[in-house]
Amino acid sequence: MANNALRRTVSNVDSRRDTLAPMKLTTKLFLAFLLLLLGIAYAQNARPSAPQATQVPMGNLGRYQIVVDPGGPNNFLLDTQTGKTWQWTRFSDLENEPKAWTAQLRFDSTQELQRWALTQITRKQA
């Protein structure tokens, strides 16, 4: 009789172990997912913000200003008197990949853009 009671106790413990095992795995998966979400949230907040442009009084501006795009590789040279702009360009198809300022087109009106467009050759459709 004592053996039967012992067998039932062992059987009950085994059945409990079987029901607890999936819960433990589920809990572990939940905690791992929660930690992953917290890590992603922290990483987004830990990114350094883009540098802010410094406001300079107009009287203190030099004629030429270099404008840097903090989100990309674009750097521009601006002539503050004429409004002409140049882009810092690397010529990757040339030996030693030289860099130079290249003039950028600027249109001050829609009519000016339309006149220019009429002088261009359109690309043939493939």
Image (cartoon, rainbow, N blue to C red):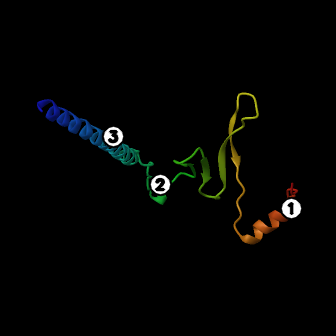
Q: Amino acid at mark 1?
A: Thr
Which secondary structure, mark 2?
A: helix
Give the residue at x 26% y 39%. Answer: 15
Foreground residue, 22 or 58? 22
Expressed as whole percent of the image width and height from the top left, the position of residue 46 reads: 37, 44
Marks 3,1: beta carbons within 8 A: no
Foreground residue, 11 or 119? 11
Q: Image check: 32 left or right of 69?
A: left
Q: Earlier in the sequence, mark 2 or mark 3?
A: 3
Looking at the image, residue 95 lies above or below residue 121: above
Q: Amino acid at mark 3?
A: Leu
Residue of label 3: 25
Q: Earlier in the sequence, mark 2 or mark 1?
A: 2
> Which image quadrant: the N terminus?
top left
Residue of label 1: 119
Expressed as whole percent of the image width and height from the top left, the position of residue 55 reads: 44, 56
- Determine crowd level at label 2: few under 14, some 14-19, many 20+ residues with C-alpha closer than 10 A: few
Residue of label 2: 60
Residue found at the very far bottom of the displayed protein? 111
Residue found at the very far left of the displayed protein? 2
Looking at the image, residue 59 lies above or below residue 101: below
